[in-house]
């Protein structure tokens, strides 16, 4: 599947399917192991990610890295990390429905090709998109969901930026969600 993912990333690198193409520096397709049991899906690249072409390398990413080590005992090369939209929205605004829809086939292919046992959705955008719901993350999180065919586990949690803003309580709940994901990894 590694070859197919590389081909897809190559294709995405010149994508002009939505308006975000105009303002981006780099398409931030995804990073990590192509055969990971665990996949993280964030919202969209920020300034740092857009510069470097790598997801979650800014402040949110540093927190994510720390949580990976502390709660899961892994680092980012042991999982696969991507976003709902692969190009940076200007001024870090929320991605729009048409941009999310245009990028969705890439995410669907990434899930299919990496074939993780567990997907952790970080924040509202990825959680709502994959669970096809309007329910917000505060209500969605705290449990796992069956997702897709073949079936996998989906664990919604807060976006690390929310934990950076929200303090100890949000962070504690995020940690609990990651422990939930870890337990589920042995049980597809
Ligand atoms: N926030 C995201 O949702 N994704 C990134 O890659 C970085 C910050």
Image (cartoon, rainbow, N blue to C red):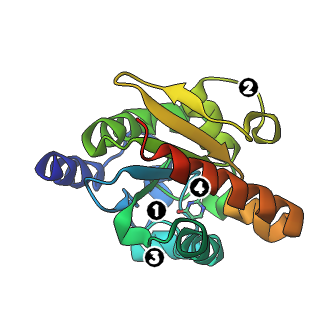
Q: What element carries label 3?
A: helix
Front-most of residues 56 and 146:
146
Count the numbered circles shown. 4
Residue that numbered label 1 is attached to: 24
Sequence-first disc among 4 and 2: 4
Give the percent coordinates (x, y) of residue 177. Answer: 67, 51
Give the percent coordinates (x, y) of residue 86. Answer: 44, 52
Relative horizontal placement of residue 42, taking residue 106 as reference (left or right): right
Relative horizontal placement of residue 144, taking residue 171 as reference (left or right): left
Residue that numbered label 2 is attached to: 134
Q: What element carries label 1?
A: loop
Q: Residue at x 74, y 41 (%)?
A: 142
Sequence-first disc among 2 and 1: 1
Q: Quadrant of the C terminus?
A: top left
Cα separation between marks 2 and 3 = 32 Å
Give the percent coordinates (x, y) of residue 52. Answer: 42, 76
Residue that numbered label 4 is attached to: 89
Local crowd at mark 4 within 10 Å, few (<14), some, or many (≥20)? many
* Cβ atoms at labels 4 and 2 below 8 Å apart: no
Q: Which residue is drawn at 62% across and 35% down?
A: 144
Cα separation between marks 4 and 2 = 21 Å
Pair 3/1: label in front: 3
Sequence-first disc among 3 and 1: 1
Local crowd at mark 1 within 10 Å, few (<14), some, or many (≥20)? some
Q: What element carries label 2?
A: loop
Cα separation between marks 2 and 1 = 28 Å
Front-most of residues 188 and 61:
188
Residue that numbered label 3 is attached to: 51
Q: Which residue is drawn at 70% across and 42% down?
A: 124
Local crowd at mark 3 within 10 Å, few (<14), some, or many (≥20)? some
Quarter occupied by residue 152: top left
């Amino acid at each position: 599947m590694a070859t197919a993912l590389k081909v897809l990333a190559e294709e995405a690198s010149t994508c002009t399917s939505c308006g975000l193409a105009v303002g981006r520096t780099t398409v931030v397709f995804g990073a990590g192991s192509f055969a990971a049991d665990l996949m993280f899906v964030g919202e969209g690249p920020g300034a740092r990610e857009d510069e470097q072409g790598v997801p979650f390398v800014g402040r949110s990413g540093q927190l994510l890295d720390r949580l990976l080590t502390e709660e899961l005992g892994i680092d980012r090369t042991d999982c696969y990390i991507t976003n709902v939209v692969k190009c940076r929205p200007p001024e870090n605004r929320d991605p729009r429905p048409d941009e999310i829809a245009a990028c969705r086939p890439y995410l669907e292919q990434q899930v299919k090709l990496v074939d993780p046992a567990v997907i952790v959705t970080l924040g509202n955008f990825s959680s709502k998109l994959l669970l096809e719901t309007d329910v917000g993350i505060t209500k969605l999180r705290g449990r796992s969901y069956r997702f897709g065919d073949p079936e996998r586990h989906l664990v919604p949690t807060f976006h690390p930026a929310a934990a950076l803003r929200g303090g100890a309580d949000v962070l504690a709940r995020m940690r609990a969600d990651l422990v939930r994901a870890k337990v589920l990894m042995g049980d597809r």
